[in-house]
Amino acid sequence: MALRINDTAPDFTAETTQGRINFHDWIGEGWALLFSHPKDFTPVCTTELGALAGLQGEFEARNCKVIGVSVDGVNDHEAWSKDIEASQGHAVGYPLIGDPNLEVVKAYDMLPSGAGDTCAGRTPADNATARSVFVIGPDKKIKATLTYPMSSGRNFAEILRLLDSCQLTAQQQLATPANWQPGDDVIISPAVSDEEASRRFPGGWDQPLPYIRIVPQPGDK
């Protein structure tokens, strides 16, 4: 069954490069970024894990834990992490989930149920759909998803921007427009009446169309 925004992120228990975890317990009271890759020791994913390692502090500053998953075992992850640090200049400080039985990627609908039950003999092309990102909130609900092809490296600056938007709009009845960056103007949610908006934004708002009300981003996210 396909996972959608606002669905509960599937819970699981698995071995990682930082020990055995229960996913929901590991998330705790904060946010989480779960991202998958088709195979260890592959070129594009090597650059991605290195780029994310360099940005891990940015995610942590936003109370967001980072975790990766591949349909390979923990021993392979540990060996691959050495290549990533050597070639990309950043040590992988976040855990990588070992999923040799394909349980996690199936639970997250990244591989079909008929994909088998072992990573043995599988090529990156066999796992090409395991290229997703899930932004998960403190309530363990999926807030956003992204899926990229194997040939396109993921843009983690955009994922940070997406996280900023999700966190802002989770706290306030606001929305962020196209190409929004933190600190830019935001949109008052259509669910907020003009009367309520007047109380929240006594300085008023710009209204280029009857259904668009634009205000400066209030305070910190």
Image (cartoon, rainbow, N blue to C red):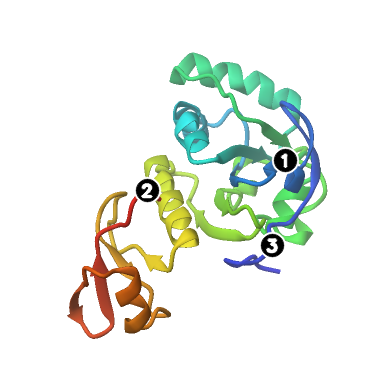
Q: What is the number of the mark on residue 26? A: 1
Kind of residue sitting beneath label 1 = Trp
Between the residue at mark 1 and the residue at mark 2, the CA separation in whole angstroms equals 26 Å
**Which residue is rendered at x = 43% and y = 68% of the image?**
173
Circle 2 sits on which residue?
Answer: 220
The residue carrying pointer 2 sits among few (fewer than 14), some (14 to 19) or many (20 or more) residues within 10 Å by Cα, namely few
Viewer-proximal residue among 183 and 181: 183
**Which residue is rendered at x = 67% and y = 56% of the image?**
140
Q: Position of residue 126 (x, y in %)?
A: 65, 48
Secondary structure beneath label 1: helix
Kind of residue sitting beneath label 3 = Thr
Viewport quadrant of the N terminus: bottom right
Say left or right for 19 vs 207: right
Q: Position of residue 40 (x, y in %)?
A: 62, 31
Secondary structure beneath label 3: loop
Residue 14 vs 84, above or below: the answer is below
Say left or right for 219 vs 96: left
Task: Find residue 176 and report its image quarter.
Answer: bottom left
Q: Mark 1 or mark 2: which comes first in sequence?
A: 1
Q: Position of residue 193 (x, y in %)?
A: 37, 83
Residue 59 vs 192, above or below: the answer is above
Viewer-proximal residue among 170 and 133: 170
Circle 3 sits on which residue?
Answer: 8
